[in-house]
Image (cartoon, rainbow, N blue to C red):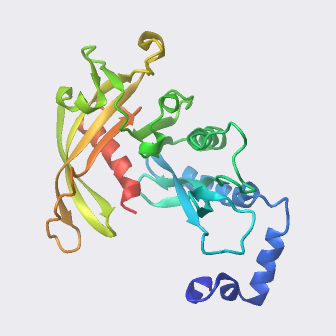
Amino acid sequence: MITNQAGLSFSQALGNGFRQTIAGIFARNQLTPKVMLSGHQQETIKRAVKSEGEYIIAVQDTTYYNYTGHQQLSGIGKIQGKIKGLLQHNLMLLNQQGMPLGVFYQEYWTRKGGSMDLAEGEKESEKWFKGLEALREETTEVEHKIVLVEDREADIFDFFKAERGDKIELLVRVHEPRKLELVRDGRVTSLPELSQYLPEYGEKTVQVRRKNREVAVRVRLKAGEVNVYPRADLSPARHKTQGLSVVIAEEIDCVDVKTQERVEQEAAGTSWLLLTSLAVGNREEVERVVEFYAMPLAH
């Protein structure tokens, strides 16, 4: 198996027969990344359909591949400065217990001078919308609610308002200091000032990976329904979001899962500001939002 040949080059690890098979696949222009992923995507959907529980968790994020050391490699662009490589955006499905079901969607691109450069006028931020569109169009067989989880790079106002359909829920960690309106009393405040106006929902412990070790983080919870205001040149009354809420999880303490020793808090510690379309009307619902966000961080 390839995994038993980790100390060898990729070509050597494959062996002659497998290397020729792989070379034949790469030589066929019709075998695009989308075509090659399609079979796996179909199996991922089948696993999602059979999953227990009410929810499926869909997580999307971007990976960077650094090929600067491959001096003879041509046709590749830059990912930053003089660093040669490509970017891969992935959307993976997990069941409600956190078990990976498979990669559901992928796309690749390069920056500056590569054969896979984005088209003129195309923005990298469109990857979030493409992942959402793929979910909406390709999961018609899945009857579960699908919670689409993103980190701070997806803090994009237009993404909050993008068409999701009836079964896709949004969960994004936000950080931009936008204006928000508290639904319960109409108060308008900025994101950094929001916490003081939200009711508390107790404490919860979640398990995540931090600096390559598993830790249990105890957080204090606050939550409330909000409308997010658009940029300053648009009317809040006409363009603000509807049907969203914010959950704030602030670290109280942290313990190493293996040793049970207390972990010194980093700088400001964990502070998650989570914008979601999921309900947050009681403690159970608030805790569920935090569980769904923490789930990918634990794997």
Residue 156 visible within the image: yes
- Determine the image quadrant of residue 4: bottom right
Q: Nearer the viewer, residue 176 or 167?
A: 176
Q: Position of residue 205 (x, y in %)?
A: 22, 53
> Against 1, is 217 above or below?
above
> Against 99, is 18 above or below?
below
Residue at 67%, 59% (x, y): give it. 77
Residue 51 visible within the image: no
In the image: residue 150, left or right of residue 298: right
Q: Position of residue 136 (x, y in %)?
A: 61, 38
Q: Nearer the viewer, residue 107 or 122?
A: 122
In the image: residue 196, left or right of residue 207: left
Q: Nearer the viewer, residue 220 or 44?
A: 220
Residue at 37%, 57% (x, y): give it. 297
Q: Quadrant of the C terminus?
A: bottom left
In the image: residue 92, left or right of residue 295: right
Q: Quadrant of the N terminus?
A: bottom right
- Determine the image quadrant of residue 31: bottom right
> Against 274, is 59 above or below?
below
Q: Position of residue 74 (x, y in %)?
A: 74, 67
Residue at 17%, 34% (x, y): give it. 200
- Determine the image quadrant of residue 189: top left
